[in-house]
Every structure is written in structure tokens, then in C-alpha cells.
Image (cartoon, grey):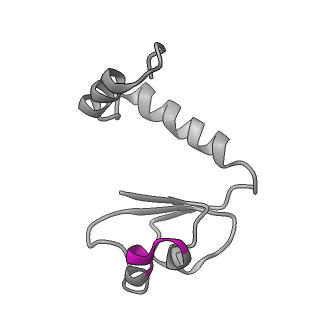
């Protein structure tokens, strides 16, 4: 799954921007969160048109669901904890 939030890939991510006219990687789902209808939304499986300024609450809500359902990559999470300077768990 590819998740793009608040970005126009053609302008900001050169390698992804050139691929945008052809669509995402075959078989991959594309989720775009942007209040604007940008060119890449044409290929999106889901286009979330949140209110401007609500990116952080959207990401926090997604993180809550991912952690609540156990969908996080546990190996990466363990490695992140080992290298983190924070004493608080993820």
C-alpha cells in the first residue's frame, strides 16, 4: 500500500512523480489524503478529502487503529525501541 498525504508527487518526489501518469505499482493500493483533487487521485483506491490542517489528527487516528489491531511491523518496532533515546514505548 502506498499512502500519500498533503503532497503533489510530481512536484515533490521526482521518481514517484514521473510514475504518476502510469498509476501506482501494479497490484498496490494507493491511498491519497489531500483536500485537493490532485492528478494522482485519479489512480487512488481511496481519496480522503480531510479538512485543511487536520493531517496530524488523521495520522494519529490511523496510528491508533494500526496499533489497536496489531497491524504494525513488530520487528521494526522492536528495532526502533532499541535505537530510540526516549524511555517511553511507542
For the residue pair 78 and 48, the one nearer the viewer reads as: 78
Secondary structure mostly seen in magenta is helix
Which residue is found at the position 36% from the left and 85% from the top? 22
**Position above or below: 59 against 52:** above
For the residue pair 78 and 57, the one nearer the viewer reads as: 78
User: Residue pushed farthest top?
Assistant: 87
Please provide percent x and percent y for residue 43: 45, 76
User: Residue pushed farthest bottom?
Assistant: 21
Q: Is residue 25 left or right of residue 63?
A: left
Which residue is found at the position 28% from the left and 28% from the top? 79
Q: Is residue 39 left or right of residue 25?
A: right
**Position above or below: 64 against 52:** above
Quadrant of the snapshot with the N terminus: bottom left
> Which range is magenta?
12-17
Q: Is residue 62 left or right of residue 71?
A: right
Which residue is found at the position 69% from the left and 55% from the top? 50
**Position above or below: 62 against 68:** below
Which residue is found at the position 66% from the left and 40% from the top? 57
Quadrant of the snapshot with the C terminus: top left
Please provide percent x and percent y for residue 40: 51, 76
Asked which quadrant contains residue 59, the reply is top right
Asked which quadrant contains residue 73, the reply is top left
For the residue pair 32 and 79, the one nearer the viewer reads as: 79
Membership of 44 in magenta stretch: no
Please provide percent x and percent y for residue 56: 65, 43
Amino acid at each position: 500500500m502506498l499512502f500519500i498525504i498533503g503532497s503533489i508527487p510530481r512536484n515533490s518526489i521526482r521518481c514517484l512523480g514521473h510514475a504518476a501518469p502510469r498509476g501506482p505499482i501494479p497490484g498496490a493500493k494507493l491511498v491519497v489524503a489531500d483536500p485537493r483533487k490532485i492528478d494522482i487521485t485519479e489512480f487512488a483506491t481511496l481519496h480522503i478529502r480531510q479538512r485543511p490542517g487536520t493531517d496530524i489528527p488523521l495520522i494519529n487516528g490511523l496510528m491508533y487503529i494500526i496499533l489497536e489491531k496489531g497491524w504494525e511491523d513488530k520487528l521494526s518496532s522492536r528495532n526502533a525501541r532499541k535505537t530510540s533515546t526516549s524511555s517511553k514505548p511507542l
